Amino acid sequence: MALADRVTERLSTARLTHLTRPEATATATPDTAILALACTDAAAEFALLAGLAYDETQAVHVAMAIQGVELVLSRYAGRIDEAWRLRWDSWTVACRALGATQARARLSPETTSALTPSTEVASGEERTPDFDRAEFSDIVPGSWPGASGEADE
């Protein structure tokens, strides 16, 4: 079922007509072309904000997308006021929160470094990293002449 069908199931015909045909008062049916465009734009905004592709089998995606369609239709009609901005901000925060909990685009720890971490020692003794080998002992920071408190001659 397409997002437009989900929207028409959940919103009244009068509400959809008011949103899709803001200047026409006598028309009794919603403008399906405008509704389809709003659905496309809302799904794109959802994907951008949440980092997830809209999936109509996920109830939370449907609920979020329907709110987005209402907001996009209001934007098309030029009904942008403080209440709309608050609803938009709330919707964008909710989309980002959904993405933070469900998106597969999480950062996984990885590196391109040739260095490998030292293995843990169960006895509790300290182990220096592999790059802290003896060949670097003569280039320890602060080991210039006189660094140990001796006067240069």
Image (spheres, rainbow, N blue to C red):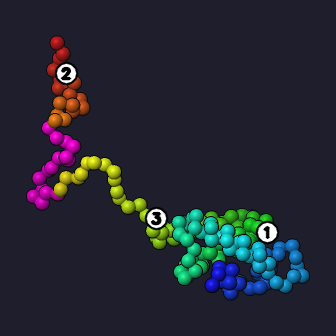
* Res. 79 visible in picture: no
* Amino acid marked by disc 3: Ala
Segment colored magenta: 120-134
Is residue 141 placed above or below 16 in the rendered structure?
Answer: above
Q: Residue at x 19, y 52 (%)?
A: 118
> Residue 84: which quarter of the image?
bottom right
Q: Residue at x 35, y 59 (%)?
A: 109
Mark 1–mark 3 Cα distance, whole angstroms, equals: 34 Å
Residue 10, percent from left and from top: 67, 85
| First in sequence: mark 3 vs mark 2 | 3
Residue 38, percent from left and from top: 71, 72
Is residue 110 placed above or below 93 in the rendered structure?
Answer: above
Is residue 18 placed above or below 125 in the rendered structure?
Answer: below
How packed is label 3: few (under 14 Cα within 10 Å), some, or many (20 or more)?
few
Q: Which mark is residue 77?
A: 1
Magenta region includes residue 15: no
Q: Which mark is residue 146?
A: 2
Mark 3–mark 2 Cα distance, whole angstroms, equals: 53 Å
How packed is label 2: few (under 14 Cα within 10 Å), some, or many (20 or more)?
few
Task: Point out the residue furthest to the top here.
Answer: 153
